[in-house]
Amino acid sequence: MSAEPQLQHWQDQLEASLPRDVDQPITVRVYQQTASTQDVARSFAPRRALVVADQQTAGRGRLGRQWLSVPGAAVLMSVCWPSEGMGATHDRVSMLVGVAVAQAVERLLPGVRVRLKWPNDVMIDGRKLAGILIEAAKGAYIIGIGLNVTPQAYSDPTLASKATCLADHGCKVDRLRVIEQIVIELERVLRLGDHGPMLDDWRARATLGQQQTFEHNKDRISGEVLDLDPDQGLIVRRDSGEIVRLPAATTSVVS
């Protein structure tokens, strides 16, 4: 379903305000409701595209998990970004996107420190603000971002103690402003040739030195988070002493 009149100005404003690239123009689509912004964005690959929805009926998170959405409560967006010439692995893109979203949120919430939990959680004060999903398509990465704007985004009582939203921290800007800021930061970090500063930023936000439990290829792995290899994943010392690398594509956080 395409944009209703109340959302039509989103598409017009995004097309007018987003960074222009003559060689790689960006296609913008805004929907009142769609099954999944990821699937719509995938249809544009390998061309650049931004897809936004007020609601998803079949949204998904990582590893096939369902992503529930309530109209008006969250930012639901996907970006199709050409992978040719990037020289970036799935794990490196995951790192870059996490930093970009964190920096965008901090611009919207001055004084708030945003943390990152590998591979896809954006956190404030130990609670999840946003999730990131990176998928590969023909010559492109499809970058999905779901970010809680109001408490209605996690109305499920089982999520209330684990989630947070922009409104919880005094952010009164509308979702359009949030989308614009995220895209600006994504454009900036994904075009960087030197990813060293972004890796340092990720490290400063991460849970290095802490004990965590992950699920990787149906195996549960507990240990100390040592570092991030931007091409091979999170480096963890298991309780047994073994050093393992946990790629973003096949890893999820248990606790």
Image: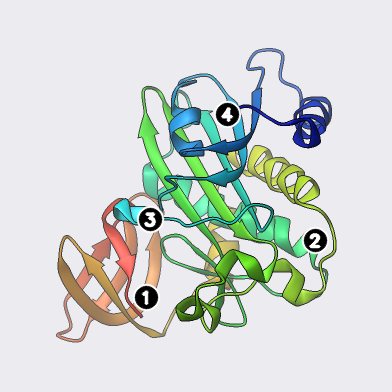
- Which residue matches tag 2? 108
Q: Label 1 vs label 4: CA separation? A: 45 Å
**Considering only order in the chain, which callout, 3 or 2, is on the residue closer to the N terminus?**
3
Tell me, yes or no, whether the two marked residues, 1 and 4, touch with CB atoms within 8 Å. Answer: no
Label 2 is placed on what type of residue?
Answer: Leu
Comparing 117 with 131, the one in front is 131
Q: Label 2 vs label 4: CA separation? A: 30 Å
- Residue 221 visible in image: yes
Label 4 is placed on what type of residue?
Answer: Met
- Which residue matches tag 4? 1
Q: Quadrant of residue 11?
A: top right
Comparing 243 with 147, the one in front is 147
- Which residue matches tag 1? 226
Per the image, label 3 sits on a secondary structure element best described as loop
Q: What residue appears at the point 53 percent right and 30 percent down from the top-left corner?
A: 81
Q: What residue appears at the point 40 percent right and 69 percent down from the top-left corner?
A: 227
- Residue 75: image location, x then y, percent: 64, 51
**Considering only order in the chain, which callout, 4 or 1, is on the residue closer to the N terminus?**
4
- Residue 194 visible in image: no
Q: Label 3 vs label 4: CA separation? A: 20 Å
- Which residue matches tag 3? 66
Relative side of 177 to 105, left or right: right
**Considering only order in the chain, which callout, 1 or 3, is on the residue closer to the N terminus?**
3
Per the image, label 2 sits on a secondary structure element best described as helix
Q: Is residue 82 above or below residue 106?
A: above
Labels 2, 3: front one: 3
Labels 1, 2: front one: 2
Comparing 181 with 93, the one in front is 181
Q: Label 3 vs label 1: CA separation? A: 30 Å
**Considering only order in the chain, which callout, 4 or 2, is on the residue closer to the N terminus?**
4
Per the image, label 1 sits on a secondary structure element best described as strand
**Considering only order in the chain, which callout, 4 or 3, is on the residue closer to the N terminus?**
4
